[in-house]
Image: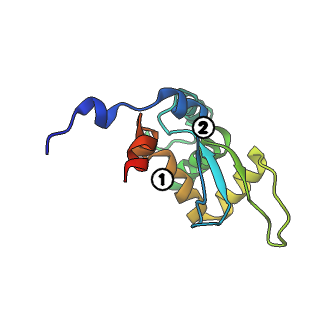
Amino acid sequence: MAMSLTRAFNTDRDLEEQGKWFNDVLGDKSDVNLKVRRMSAEAVVKFQQDMVQQNRYRMKEGKFSEEVANEILIETLAGAVLVDWNGVTDDEGITVPFSVDAARKYLTDLRDFRLLVSALANNMDAYRKGVEADISKN
C-alpha cells in the first residue's frame, strides 16, 4: 500500500521541542511518566554540540572513547532530553522530584533507564503529527 511521505515524516516540531509525555513507561498502571524531547530537537542538538565542544580536548585520533561518548550522552539526556517526570520514587517509595541532578544519577546508574529514555527520544512515530488520532482509530 502506498503512503504519503508527508504523512509518514511530518512531525510536530513544537512537541519535539517542548517534549512529549510518555505515560506508564514501566508498563500498564505503573504511573511512571516521562516528558521527553526528541533527539533532533534544536535544544537537544545545541546542547549536545556544546558538550562535544567542551570535551573536544578528550578526543583521540579524531574521536571520543566509548567512556567519553557515554558521558556526553548521559549529560545530553539529563540536561536537554528528559524534561520532567512524575511517579518516580526511590527504593523506600519516597517521591523523587525531577531535577537534572536526579536524572543524571538515574541515567548513569541504570543503563536500561538510559536506553529507554534514548529510545523514546529517537522514536519518530511518537512525535508524528496526528499520531494520537491514528492511535484512537485502532
Q: Which residue is mark 1?
A: 119
Q: Is residue 61 among what the camera can see?
A: no
The residue at the point 64 percent across, 65 percent down is 110
Q: Position of residue 19 (x, y in %)?
A: 59, 37
Q: Position of residue 80 (x, y in %)?
A: 63, 37
Q: Is residue 33 among what the camera can see?
A: yes
Q: Nearer the viewer, residue 82 or 94?
A: 94
Q: Which residue is mark 2?
A: 55
The residue at the point 29 percent across, 37 percent down is 8
Q: SS of the residue at dot 2?
A: loop
Q: Position of residue 22 (x, y in %)?
A: 57, 50
User: Would you say the residues marked 1 and 2 are in contact, meaning their CB atoms lie under 8 Å apart?
Assistant: no
Mark 1 or mark 2, earlier in chain = 2
Q: Residues within 10 Å of mark 1 (few under 14, many from 20)?
A: few
Q: Quadrant of residue 91?
A: bottom right
Q: Is residue 28 left or right of residue 96?
A: left
Mark nearer the viewer, 1 or 2: 1
Q: Nearer the viewer, residue 93 or 104?
A: 93
The residue at the point 36 percent across, 30 percent down is 10
The image shows residue 117, relative to residue 133, as above or below, that is below
The residue at the point 50 percent across, 54 percent down is 66
Q: Position of residue 45 (x, y in %)?
A: 52, 31
Q: Quadrant of residue 3?
A: top left
* Residue type of the residue flagged with mark 1: Ala
Q: Is residue 51 left or right of residue 121?
A: right
Q: Nearer the viewer, residue 129 or 57?
A: 129
User: What is the CA distance from the residue labelled 1 to the residue labelled 2?
Assistant: 24 Å
